[in-house]
Image (spheres, grey):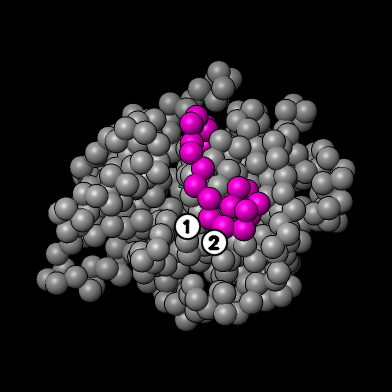
Amino acid sequence: MSSRFSYSQKLSNPLQNNLASHIVGELFSPEECDEAHRIISQWQGYQPTPLMSLSDIAASAGVDQIFYKDESGRFDLGSFKALGGAYAIDCLMHKAPENKLVVCTATDGNHGRSVAWAADFCQAECHIFIHAKVSAARADALAALGATIHRVEGNYDDSIVACREQAVKYGWQIVSDTSWPGYRDVPKLVMTGYSVMTHELIQQLGDTKPTHIILQAGCGAMAGALIASMWLHWGPSLPTVIVVESDKSDCVYQSLKRDQIHLVNIVEETLMAGLSCGEVSELAWPIIRAGVSHVITINDEGIGPMVRWLANPTTSDRPAIVGGECSASGLIALLAIQQDPTLADEVGMDGRSRVLVIGTEGNTDAAVYDAIMRGDI
Ligand SMILES: Cc1ncc(COP(=O)(O)O)c(C=O)c1O
C-alpha cells in the first residue's frame, strides 16, 4: 500500500522569512479571532471537532504522533468550511439594512454549503455558482439548502468570474472565501471564522506542541487563516508549516516559485474537489509566502487507499474515521515525505516528530466516497 503514496513536486520555500506581527495583523487580531469564537460557539449545534491520534498511520510514517483534527462533523455540513462563509453571513446580516441581503458565491461545493446554510437560516436569497465538473451530489446538497444553482462552463475560476459579473449586475453581496484586489473584507471574515479551529486545537493540544503542520490548500484561505492564528499563539516558535496541494491545481507552488500570485489554468479536475482552485487568495498570499516552509504537490493516486485506511484502522486505539478526498491529502503528503529520506531530512521530520493534519472533510460527495469504499477508485 505504502508505495502508492508519493509526491509529484516539492518546493523548499526560498521566501520563508518568519512571519511578523504586521503581516498577521493585516489579516486579523487576537480580539477578532476571539470574537469569531464567541459568536460561532453560540450557534446551535456547536461543538469543538475532535482531535484524534492516528497511531497506525504514525507507525507507518515513522513519526512519533499524528494529530488529526476531524472536521467531518462540523455543524452537520461535513467540512470545516461551515465556519467561514456562515460566519461572514452572520456578520453581514447584522449590518444589512432591515436585515435584507441577497448573497452569492462560487464554490466547488463545501464553501457554498456554508453560505447556503447560513443564508437559509437568515432567510436571505442565495445564488451559488458551480463549474461544469462539480458533481451532481454536491449540486443537490446545495439546492437542498434552498440556494439557486447556476451551472457555469469551465473551471472554478470561471465560476468566480460568472459570480462576480452577476453580482455587479444585480447588486448581490458576494460571500467568497477567496479575495482579490479591492475585495478583502468578506474573505477576511471567512478566514476569521476558520481561526476557530486554531482556538479549539490550542485547547485540545494542551502543553503538547506539534513539530510540523501539514495544511492542504485550494485558494489558501484555510492555510493562511490557520498559520496566522497559530502564529498569534506560538509566535516565532510556530511549528514547521508544509502546504500540500493537487498537482492539477498547484497555485501555491507556482506562485511561490515566481514570488507573485500566479493563475494556474486547471485543465483536469482532481478528485480532491475542494483543492481545485487556480489562484491563491490575495489575503492569504503574504502569510503563505512568509510562513510556509515547503510545498508538496500530489496526484490522485493515493487518495483511495488513504480514505479506506482512515475508515479501517489497523490498530484498535482509534475509531474508524470518515475522511473525504481532501482529508487524505495531508496524510498522503506525510507518507510521501517519509519515503524520501532527503526530503524528510530537509523538512526535519523523524521519529520524534509530532505532525498535525487537518481532516478537512468527511463524506461530502457520497457517489465518490462510495466508489472509493468499493475500491473502484
Ligand atoms: C474539504 C476541503 N479541504 C480543503 C479546502 C481548501 O481550502 P482553501 O480553498 O481555503 O485553501 C477546501 C476548499 O474548498 C475544502 O473544501
Mark sitting on residue 346: none
- Answer yes or no: disc 1 within 8 Å of ligand 1: yes
- Name the spot of residue 243 as percent of width and height, x first: 64, 52
- Name the spot of residue 155 as percent of width and height, x first: 40, 36
**Which residue position is annotated with label 1?**
281
Task: Answer left or right for 243 relative to 28.
Answer: right
Q: Residue at the location (53% across, 55% down)? A: 261
Mark sitting on residue 285: 2
Kind of residue sitting beneath label 2: Trp
Q: Are marks 1 and 2 in contact (CB under 8 Å)?
A: yes
The stretch of residues the image draws in magenta is: 252-272
Label 2 SS: helix
Q: Quadrant of the C terminus?
A: top right
Is residue 369 something one can see in this rendering?
no
Label 1 SS: loop
Q: Residue at the location (56% across, 66% down)? A: 286
Q: Quadrant of the N terminus?
A: top right
Task: Answer left or right for 33 relative to 247.
Answer: left
